[in-house]
Amino acid sequence: MNDANMNGFLFLVIERYNWPADQAGNREFILNFTNTIKSSMVNGAPGGVGIYTRYNDWSQIVGGSWTGASDMDLFWVNWNGRQDLTTGFTPFGGWSAPCFHQYAGNVVTNNCTGGAPINYDYHGDCVCQDAVCYNKFVEKRAMRFARHKLDQRH
């Protein structure tokens, strides 16, 4: 990770699977983990750390009122079928809005994944904690989509 042109964004997945019941310990782990990642990023390189979770998981693991990670972008999970950042969202954990939304999951289709289950995410126009990283993320996503369309023509 010595290339200043590299860019990355890591989301820490906070789901109910295998977390201890100790909410204070879980909070400490999350902060230690994310701070370690942040401090190991190359100076000046775009990148960031976010939280991937849903209200119920967050509440059970760290407590619904804990706001210690709200300075990171929220990747909100709610399989409501809506490609937006607002339908069904209730603020929690100090986040007033998500930056990303996973609106469908485990969808099996043969259109492009050969029957493998895939998730669908929405990345709207939002104000993320790291605008440079978000813009690079959107740019790379657009380039991947364009390459995929080009590959389909050949």
Image (cartoon, rainbow, N blue to C red):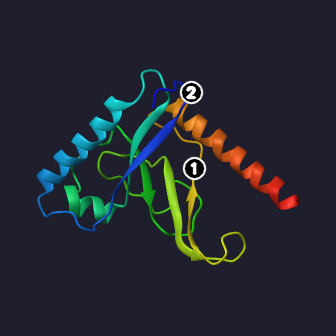
In this rendering, would 91 be left or right of 140?
left
Quick check: 67 above or below 114?
A: above
Residue 72 or 5: which is nearer the viewer? 5
- Amino acid type of the residue tagged 1 in the rendering: His
Q: What's the residue at 13%, 52% (across, down)?
A: 25
Residue marked by disc 2: 5
Quick check: 113 above or below 43?
A: below
Categorize mark 1 by other alpha carbons within 10 Å: few (<14), some (14-19), many (20+): some
| Res 71 → quadrant | top left
| Res 61 → quadrant | bottom left
Q: What's the residue at 32%, 53% (across, down)?
A: 92
Residue extending farthest top: 44
In this rendering, would 145 be left or right of 39?
right
Residue 77 position, x and y percent, is 44, 61
Residue marked by disc 1: 123
Q: Is residue 70 visible?
A: yes
Residue 33 position, x and y percent, is 26, 43
Figure label count: 2
In this rendering, would 101 be left or right of 53?
right
Q: What's the residue at 13%, 64% (across, down)?
A: 21
- How far apart are labels 1 and 2 at the CA level? 23 Å
Which of labels 1 and 2 is toward the front? Answer: 2
Q: What's the residue at 32%, 42% (across, down)?
A: 70
Check disc 1 and report its element: helix, strand or loop.
Answer: loop
- Amino acid type of the residue tagged 2 in the rendering: Asn
Check disc 2 and report its element: helix, strand or loop.
Answer: loop
In this rendering, would 12 be left or right of 30?
right
Categorize mark 2 by other alpha carbons within 10 Å: few (<14), some (14-19), many (20+): few
User: In the rendered structure, which disc, 1 or 2, sits on the residue that comes first in sequence?
Assistant: 2
